Image (cartoon, grey):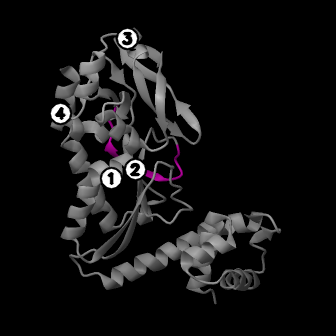
Amino acid sequence: MLRLEDLTLFVRAAALNSFSDAAREAGVPPAQVSSAIKRLENALHIRLFARSTRSLRLTVEGESWLPYALQMLETLRAGLQKIQASDNEVSGTLQIAVPSDLGRHLLLSVFRDFRERHPALRLRLLFSDQIADVFKDPVDVAFRYGVNADASYVALPVAPDNRRVLVASPDWLARHGRPTTLGELAQHNALTFVLRGKLHDRWTLLADGNIHEVNVQSTIMSDDAEAIRRLAIAGEGIAYKSWLDVSEDVQAGRLQVILPQYQGERVPLNMICPHRQQLSPAVRLLYEAVKARCDSLASFAAQSHCN
């Protein structure tokens, strides 16, 4: 008989590549994780992990069995939610991964309103610019920017037409002037983003069917997208941001769109799920709430990009 706790510890140890980290996360002694893995290996008659004093990794058999362990845990969790929830109520815990700026600035109010409408539901919010692995990380859904090129998971479009825009504060523009050409843009200080160690200092813009690339110079760089937005509002330079991240700042006058004759790169927003079985009523309702908030910004986007 396989134990639920053993399955859970195996999945977390596989995701973290560490028995001690899995134990710390679960609040149990490391020896308890080792015992859980040993029980599973004895029950399955396979070796799940290759261990050494310096490393821990899944064996080929462990890699093959991991998706089934994840599916068993999800089936158990879905069953518990089904029997605990009334016909018109969603309950349980919904774990959501969101890019930092989008989550803290735009969607936090959506999440608060959503939980107020569904008081039996608990939300676990994970704000980070690191891309969540919906198969290994402890998340039910992830909101992710970019074109979906991976058919192994379900991607529901939230804001398919979202693009990047060039923005700066009124104070910055008053002190340094408003760039009217891409050549002038290259002379201004840019606020650049670092993702997985790569500095994004080449900005791509489109006009009249032509693609233009601008190499920008920056005195401030950050791996936190929210920090880039805050620096732009503070008048430290020009930022190249997702419209969803800065829409409310543009509406409030804290930032202004510059060079609107150029279209920024497409950065569609999708809601990612590992598989369709996880499209529970709670997930579908959350999707509708977030999409409605993003849709409300579409008309204002068109106006701002034309001014």
Give the CA separation, mark 3 to mark 4: 23 Å
Identify residue for label 1.
104
Residue 100 tag number: 2
Please report contact status of discs 2 and 1: CB closer than 8 Å, yes or no: yes
Q: Identity of the amino acid at label 3?
A: Glu
Task: Identify which residue, 115 or 4, lies in the foreground.
Answer: 115
Q: Identity of the amino acid at label 4?
A: Gly
Look at discs 3 and 1 and give the one toward the viewer: 3
Quarter location, residue 61:
bottom right
Residue 191 tag number: none
Identify residue for label 4.
253
Q: Residues within 10 Å of mark 4 (few under 14, many from 20)?
A: few
Left or right: 133 with respect to 46? Answer: left
Residue 162 belongs to magenta span = yes
Q: Which quadrant is home to the C terminus?
A: top left
Highlighted range, magenta:
150-163
Identify residue for label 3.
184
Q: Earlier in the sequence, mark 3 or mark 1?
A: 1
Give the CA separation, mark 4 to mark 2: 22 Å
Q: Earlier in the sequence, mark 2 or mark 3?
A: 2
Residue 26 belongs to magenta span = no
Q: Identity of the amino acid at label 2?
A: Ser
Give the CA separation, mark 2 to mark 3: 30 Å
Q: Earlier in the sequence, mark 4 or mark 2?
A: 2
Question: Which residue occupies 67% across, 74% down?
Answer: 20
Which element type, helix, strand or loop, lies under badge 2?
helix
Residue at the extreme bottom of the image, as rendered: 1
Question: Which residue occupies 30% across, 11% down?
Answer: 180
Q: Provide residue 210's location: percent of width, then percent of height.
A: 41, 12
